[in-house]
Each structure stands twice: as structure tokens, then as C-alpha cells.
């Protein structure tokens, strides 16, 4: 493995972190245009279960997050990210040849396990170099670039599917991962020196886990992340079906998804600009209040029957932008809040917070997506409830120390 010694510039570092973050978004969003074809081929009798291809990946990612961070605390950040990429590419190859939905779901879980390295260890890598609001700023800028992936992925995937079939998507996953790993190995030095590494033994791992969970702020931010991830993953799972079955816009779904992603992408630079002025907690609570208001208005207008046809579709698109923007305005801040007290075990902290939040979010998102009944009301109502609970949890936090 190549071992660069010279630190890359901040702009290049942000771009690399954005690409590592994007591994997850690319692996989920590129599957959206393929869901009807996959349902027709692998599960024609129960097409709604094709959504599980998304949540199974997220489940694997959540489980992998438990071990990726602690391993990186013991063996270094780069080695774990690269090892996860190898597993990710192997699973993508299995998924390419999967003859049944069950095999596909198993491969997607394994693929998610591999993606956990890029997802959680990259956060620990940022924490090695930055702290507090500076870390939140770096993560926000990385997510601003990362937002382009959800915008482009469904469009690109629909073109690839048209030309080569839905299975070819898994070849693009392998290519994406190989490019990002070569970049990492050639340009990014290891950020965790040997002297700072922790032995990979049960006792210190359990001690670190207890330390992480002993902080009330961390426990609360885990719960809030769970609810926000649940809302986001539930919306992603249902989006393609709602566009096709409710609004009869299956063909234009990739274009509209790009519009949603680009509009919501303004949330990350907005957060980067404001977080240093108003603070992370204020950004989170204000965003949740706005989401509660938007979801309540959407439900009220939908039930009133005032908006129909194109107006009803526009309302749903605006609401969907709000859900995506909520993630951009909160998740980076929540991660920074969680890691701030435990910088000496950043890998463990990132693993615990990310793993618990992701696995629990799947338990919320899967039934929310499967609750689709021909309308978007179950989804919007579910997001409204999750947003209210998240806000109540944030309000229980003690005031930050100056």
C-alpha cells in the first residue's frame, strides 16, 4: 500500500471525504430507477418488497459501523477504509449474478458492511484533524459536494440501465470504489499515529463503549440521528413508487429526483455558513421546527383536497426537498456534537453513534416504506411524528458550556 507523507490541501481533502461519503449515497440512489425492473424479474408477486434492496444495504452498513471505527482505532484509518472497499466490491460482484431476491438482499447486506468503512472511518479521519465547529464546517462542505451524487446517480443509472440492463449498476459500484481507493492510497497520509492506537482487545473496547454511552449528549444525539435517518431512508424507499403510482411520473423520476437533490443541496453550504454564528444546537432545533411545520401543512392541504393534479405534485416535491434539506442541516452537526467529548476514541464514538442510529433507523424506515397505500400520506405522517420526537429530544439537552 502506498504511504504518502505530505498532507493534501484542505480543498482536496474535502473532495476526498465527499467521495468517501458518496459511496453510501451512490449505492442507494443508483438503485432507485432499477427497482421496477428488479421487482418484475426477482419478485413479481410482491413488487413492494423490492424496496428492501435499499434498506438491506443500510442495515449492513449499520452493522458494519459497529466494528469499522474500533478497528480503525487499532489498525489505522486508511487500512480499514481500503479493506471495507474490497468487501464492498466483492459483494457488488455477487449481486450482479444474483438469481433470486434473497441472494440479492444477502449481497446488499454484505455490500453495506463494506461501505461502513468509507462512511464511519472517514468521519474519524476528519475528527483526527479538526474539532468542534471547524469539524462541522468541513463535514458540511464535504456534504455540499456529496449532494451532487444523489442528483446525478439516478439520472446516470437510468441511462446505464437502458443501455446495459439493471445488473450493470453493480459494475459502476465497483468502478466508483476503485477510483476512490486509489485516490486515498496515493494522496492521503495516515492520520492516526501508532502511538495513539488502542489495542484491539475486548476489555478496552468495552471500556471505550461504556465511555461513549456514558455521555448524555451522545445518547441523545444518537436518538435524534435515528429519527432523522428513519425519515430520510423511509422517504428514499417510497419515492420511486410514489412518483410512479401516485403521480404517474415514473419516466421523469430521475429528473425530478435530481431537482430535489440539487435544491436540498443548498442546506449543507447554508449550515457551513451559519453554524459558526448560531451554533450547532440552534441549527438542529430550528430545522426540526421548520420540518414539523412543512409536514403538518402538507398533510392538511392533502386532506383538504384543495390541491390536485400538478399542484399536488408540486406540494410533494417541496416536502421531499424539505426532508433532504433536514438531513443536510442536522446530521453533520449531530455528528460533531457526538464526537466532541470523545476525540481520543473518535473511531469508537463514530462507530457507536453511526451504528445504533442506522440500525434503529432501518427498523423505522422499512415499515414506513412498506406502509405505502397508494397515497403519500402515511409517509408524510411518519416523518411528522419522527420530527416531533427529535425536537423534543433536542430540547432535553442541557445548555452547552461556553
Image (cartoon, rainbow, N blue to C red):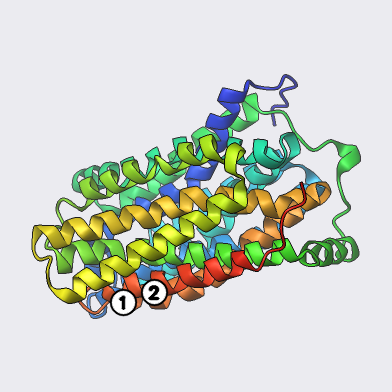
Task: Look at 53% across and 30% down and name the residue there.
Answer: 15
Q: Secondary structure at mark 1?
A: helix
| Depth order, front residue of 24/277 | 277
Mark 1 burial class by Cα count in 10 Å: few <14, some 14-19, many 20+: some
Q: Is residue 189 visible?
A: yes
43 with respect to 18 (left or right): left
Mark 2 burial class by Cα count in 10 Å: few <14, some 14-19, many 20+: many
Task: Look at 57% across and 52% down and name the residue there.
Answer: 282
Task: Look at 20% across and 71% down and name the residue there.
Answer: 302
Q: Secondary structure at mark 2?
A: helix
Asked whether the residues under the numbered discs 2 and 1 touch, taking CB atoms below 8 Å apart as contact, a structural biologist would say yes
Q: Quadrant of residue 184?
A: top right
| Depth order, front residue of 180/284 | 284
Quick one: which residue is furthest to the left in this view? 309
Task: Look at 24% across and 68% down and name the residue there.
Answer: 41
Looking at the picture, does residue 58 appear above or below residue 69? below
Q: Name the spot of residue 60 as percent of width and height, x first.
A: 55, 64
| Depth order, front residue of 41/384 | 384
- Quarter of the picture containing the N terminus is top right
| Depth order, front residue of 253/302 | 302
260 with respect to 187 (left or right): left
Residue for badge 1: 378
Q: Quadrant of residue 214?
A: bottom right
Q: Name the spot of residue 164 as percent of width and height, x first.
A: 24, 46
Instruction: Please give the label number shown on residue 382.
Output: 2
Q: Name the spot of residue 153 as percent of width and height, x first.
A: 33, 44
Q: Is residue 49 visible?
A: no
Q: Quadrant of residue 289?
A: bottom left
Amino acid at each position: 500500500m502506498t504511504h504518502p507523507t505530505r498532507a493534501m490541501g484542505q480543498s482536496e481533502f474535502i473532495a476526498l471525504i465527499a467521495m468517501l461519503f458518496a459511496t453510501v449515497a451512490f449505492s442507494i440512489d443508483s438503485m432507485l430507477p432499477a427497482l421496477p425492473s428488479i421487482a418484475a424479474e426477482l419478485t413479481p408477486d410482491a413488487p413492494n418488497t423490492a424496496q428492501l434492496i435499499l434498506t438491506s444495504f443500510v442495515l449492513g452498513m449499520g452493522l458494519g459501523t459497529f466494528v469499522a471505527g474500533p478497528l480503525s482505532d487499532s489498525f489505522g484509518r486508511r487500512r480499514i477504509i481500503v479493506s471495507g472497499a474490497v468487501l464492498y466490491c466483492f459483494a457488488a460482484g455477487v449481486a450482479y449474478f444474483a438469481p433470486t431476491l434473497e441472494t440479492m438482499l444477502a449481497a446488499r447486506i454484505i455490500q453495506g458492511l463494506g461501505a461502513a468503512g468509507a462512511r464511519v472511518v472517514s468521519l474519524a479521519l476528519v475528527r483526527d484533524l479538526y474539532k468542534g465547529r471547524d469539524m462541522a464546517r468541513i463535514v458540511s462542505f464535504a456534504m455540499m459536494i456529496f449532494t451532487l451524487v444523489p442528483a446525478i446517480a439516478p439520472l446516470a443509472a437510468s441511462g446505464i440501465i437502458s443501455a446495459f440492463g439493471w445488473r450493470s449498476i453493480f459494475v459502476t459500484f465497483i468502478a466508483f470504489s476503485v477510483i476512490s481507493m486509489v485516490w486515498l492510497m496515493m494522496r492521503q497520509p495516515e492520520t492516526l499515529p501508532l502511538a495513539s492506537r488502542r489495542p484491539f482487545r475486548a476489555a478496552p473496547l468495552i471500556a471505550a463503549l461504556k465511555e461513549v454511552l456514558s455521555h448524555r449528549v451522545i445518547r441523545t444525539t444518537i436518538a435524534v440521528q435515528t429519527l432523522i435517518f428513519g425519515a430520510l431512508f423511509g422517504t428514499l424507499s417510497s419515492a420511486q413508487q410514489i412518483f410512479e403510482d401516485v403521480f404517474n411520473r415514473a419516466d421523469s423520476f430521475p429528473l425530478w429526483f435530481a431537482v430535489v437533490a440539487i435544491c436540498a443541496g443548498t442546506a449543507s453550504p447554508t449550515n457551513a455558513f451559519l453554524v459558526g454564528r448560531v451554533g450547532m444546537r440552534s441549527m438542529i432545533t430550528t430545522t426540526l421546527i421548520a420540518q414539523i411545520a412543512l409536514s403538518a401543512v402538507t398533510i392538511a392541504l392533502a386532506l383538504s383536497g384543495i390541491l390536485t393534479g400538478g399542484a399536488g405534485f408540486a406540494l410533494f416535491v417541496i416536502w421531499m426537498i424539505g426532508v433532504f434539506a433536514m438531513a443536510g442541516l442536522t446530521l453533520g452537526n449531530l455528528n460533531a456534537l457526538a464526537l466532541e467529548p470523545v476525540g481520543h476514541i473518535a473511531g469508537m464514538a463514530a462507530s457507536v453513534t453511526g451504528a445504533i442510529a442506522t440500525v434503529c433507523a432501518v427498523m423505522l424506515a422499512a415499515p414506513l416504506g412498506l406502509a405505502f397505500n397508494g397515497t403519500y400520506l402515511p409517509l408524510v405522517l411518519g416523518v411528522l411524528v419522527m420530527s416531533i420526537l427529535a425536537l423534543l429530544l433536542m430540547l432535553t439537552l442541557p445548555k452547552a458550556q461556553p
